[in-house]
Amino acid sequence: MRYIFAEKSKNRTFLGIFTILCAASTLLNGCDQKSEWKASEQIITQKDPIVEIPQEPEEEELPSDKRVIYLTFDDGPNQGTENLIKILNKRKVCATAFIVGRHRYGSLQQKDDFEKLKKDTLIELANHSFSHAHGKYVNFYSNSINVIHDFDRASDSLKLYNKIARTPGRNIWRLNNINFTDIKKSTKAADDLRKAGYKLVGWDLEWRPTSRMTLKGNHQIMLKKVDSIFFNDLEKTSKHLVLLTHDQYLTDPNSLNELEMFIEELQKSNRFIFKKISAYPRINEVLN
């Protein structure tokens, strides 16, 4: 079966004909362990050794025919976390896990899964609060001081120091160039988290669950949704799409198969680069 993803042109299709991944698939995935620093020009004299001055790299320019996918998984460690790790390693694709602090201490299995996540070089960890608001979101966001304390507690207990975070139960963005709140009553809490230094990342597309807490729909439907978002310029940042789903939806064979096929078809297209959320454009800027 062939899937066609439209480009923003009447004369072009975005994905074109699927091709087999080339030997450089690791590079295309954007998951290789590139150095975050580059050396300046080497100055050589008769007496002096080579001098290397580290500089921050310029943001890599994205080829016009490429799009970036950020796979993100919330609420781990949880049921399905071990299955998630297996899929990512089988497909050799990177992702970001937004961790709930109290889940790290929920059971011996969750403790073990957290250690596996932390050690896996394909997976980046980020903050998803300590309590996940105990499921009482309106009350949680009504008190900014408590919200900040909850995220700080997760940061300290899990040793998550990159300040990248996602708010529980809310699609909120607070970066230098993106300010978005889905439910306005959460605005003050989001603003105060930003003032506390947190870089809040929401999502562009969510793979939702069924009533049985399995992945809803199939990978063909999700591929079409990815196409639609790019075609209609619905991403928060052009050519960059953040996909959200949850560890706990990955417990049944069908959901695992659909997620793997979704990733596989994106890879086969040879049009997508997978990156961790820390590589999202301008996310590492100092917040004003």
Image (cartoon, rainbow, N blue to C red):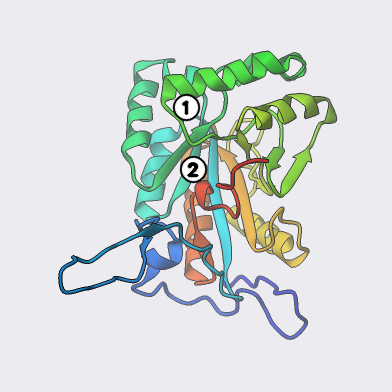
Query: What residue lies at 34% left-to-right and 46% top-to-bottom?
Result: 121
Neighbor class of circle 2 (other Cα within 10 Å; few <14, some 14-19, many 20+) is: many
Residue 211 relative to residue 119: left or right: right
Residue 201 relative to residue 50: left or right: right
Look at the picture and state if 281 lies above or below 141.
below
Q: Which residue is mark 2?
A: 96
**Quadrant of the rendered structure where residue 219 is?**
bottom right
> Which residue in the rendered view is the most extreme toward the front?
47
Q: Earlier in the sequence, mark 1 or mark 2?
A: 1
Query: What residue lies at 33% left-to-right and 42% top-to-bottom?
Result: 120
Percent of width and height locating residue 77: 45, 28
> Which residue in the rendered view is the most extreme toward the right?
184
| Camera sees residue 265 | no
Return the residue nearer the eye: 51 or 233. 51
Return the residue nearer the eye: 287 or 158. 287
Percent of width and height locating residue 111: 36, 22
Disc 1 marks a residue whose amino acid type is Asn
Query: What residue lies at 35% left-to-right and 50% top-to-bottom?
Result: 89
